[in-house]
Image (cartoon, helix red, strand yellow):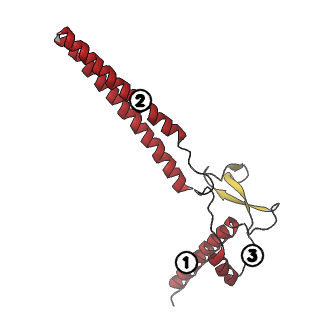
């Protein structure tokens, strides 16, 4: 076998082995199989990205103190995967989204639209009684303004809900 091919295969195998070890360590930590809680290891990242929130001035990188997973054999790991429940930090079971603010805003927005429609009906009635065409412009303007305002608030509510959903999926 050529030297370059052999070197490439060795590097690929080493990367694959490291990825499997990282996946196993994450799984073991997620199910709580760690060394003594007092012992941790520093994991580094080039940019601020939770949980990498602490700054190491010597290395010039962000880090966090991660628990050290227990050492297990491949057979033990396969058995643990069968029975262990993988629980990702920030999982939906840990904290449920409380859409109270969005619901309240949606209710207020609907009440404002209903109030605006009732106001427009009253203005149309007054315009009919006056008989002047100019008085028909006010109810139309009020209705268009409140309809646009209602639509903008609905868009903000949808954006907020989508951001909550994206945040939940990322975690």
Q: Earlier in the sequence, mark 2 or mark 1?
A: 1
Res 86 quadrant in image: bottom right
Residue underneath mark 1: 12
Up-down: is 165 above or below 152?
below
Residue underneath mark 3: 71
Residue underneath mark 2: 111
Up-down: is 54 above or below 9?
above
Q: Earlier in the sequence, mark 3 or mark 2?
A: 3
Distance of label 1 from label 3 (alpha carbons): 24 Å
Residue drawn at (50%, 84%) of the image: 5
**Is disc 3 surrounded by few (<14), some (14 to 19) or many (20+) residues within 10 Å?**
some
Q: Nearer the viewer, mark 3 or mark 2?
A: 2
For the residues bearing labels 1 and 3, Cβ distance under 8 angstroms: no
Horizontal side of 15 relative to 150 (left or right) equals right
Horizontal side of 8 relative to 157 (left or right) equals right
| Percent x, y of residue 124 | 24, 18
């Amino acid at each position: 076998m050529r030297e370059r091919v052999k070197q490439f295969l060795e590097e690929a195998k080493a990367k694959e082995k490291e990825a499997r070890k990282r996946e196993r360590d994450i799984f073991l930590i997620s199910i709580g199989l760690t060394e003594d809680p007092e012992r941790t290891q520093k994991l580094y990242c080039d940019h601020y990205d939770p949980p990498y929130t602490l700054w190491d001035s010597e290395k010039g990188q962000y880090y966090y103190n991660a628990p050290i997973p227990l050492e297990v054999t491949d057979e033990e790991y396969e058995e643990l995967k069968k029975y262990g429940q993988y629980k990702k930090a920030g999982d939906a079971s840990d904290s449920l989204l409380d859409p109270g603010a969005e619901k309240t805003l949606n209710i207020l927005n609907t009440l404002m639209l209903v109030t605006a429609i009732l106001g427009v009906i009253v203005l149309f009635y007054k315009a009919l009684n006056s008989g002047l065409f100019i008085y028909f412009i006010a109810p139309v303007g009020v209705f268009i303004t409140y309809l646009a305002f209602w639509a903008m608030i609905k868009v903000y509510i949808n954006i907020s809900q989508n951001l909550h959903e994206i945040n939940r999926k990322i975690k």
